[in-house]
Image (cartoon, helix red, strand yellow):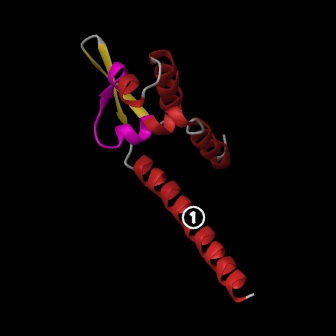
Amino acid sequence: MTVVELQANVFKAMAHKARVKILVLLRDEKQCVCDIARMINEPQPLVSRSLNALKQAGLVEAKKSGTKACYRLKSYEVVKLLDAATNIIKKQNEDMIEILQQKNKGEKNG
């Protein structure tokens, strides 16, 4: 696989809101599947499938704790990626606010 294909796989794994919720939840501490499902208010089968996709993409790792599987982020780089996405959204919103303010100024002066 090429680097671009591998990068696409990472973004594909993150392309569902439940998966992003899981990554945000795991940024601070490891969690068990049942707790993740409860905390993000999603059904446990969806959470399990999402965790499997994130694991296959190398974003999370599992550790058995008795009969439970607990997950954590595999790398801090995932947090940086989430933060980068947040910064992009903030920038888009700032740009939109500026455009709207300029439009309002033009309407008031016109």
At a point 44% along the width and 17% down the height, the residue shown is: 44
Judged from this view, the residue extending furthest toward the top is 67
Residue 61 in the image: above or below residue 77: above
Magenta highlight range: 22-35
Give the quarter of the image for residue 11: top right
Q: Is residue 104 above or below residue 60?
A: below
Q: How many marks?
A: 1
Relative depth, front residue between 60 and 95: 95
Residue drawn 45% across the image and 37% down it: 21
**Quadrant location of the N terminus in the rendered image:** top right
Q: Position of residue 49 (x, y in %)?
A: 52, 21
Residue 30 is covered by the magenta coloring: yes
Image check: 44 left or right of 105?
A: left
**Residue 82 pos. (x, y %):** 47, 50
Residue that extends furthest to the right in the rendered view of this protein: 110
69 sits to left or right of 13: left
Mark 1: give few (<14), some (14-19) or many (20+) Cα within 10 Å: few
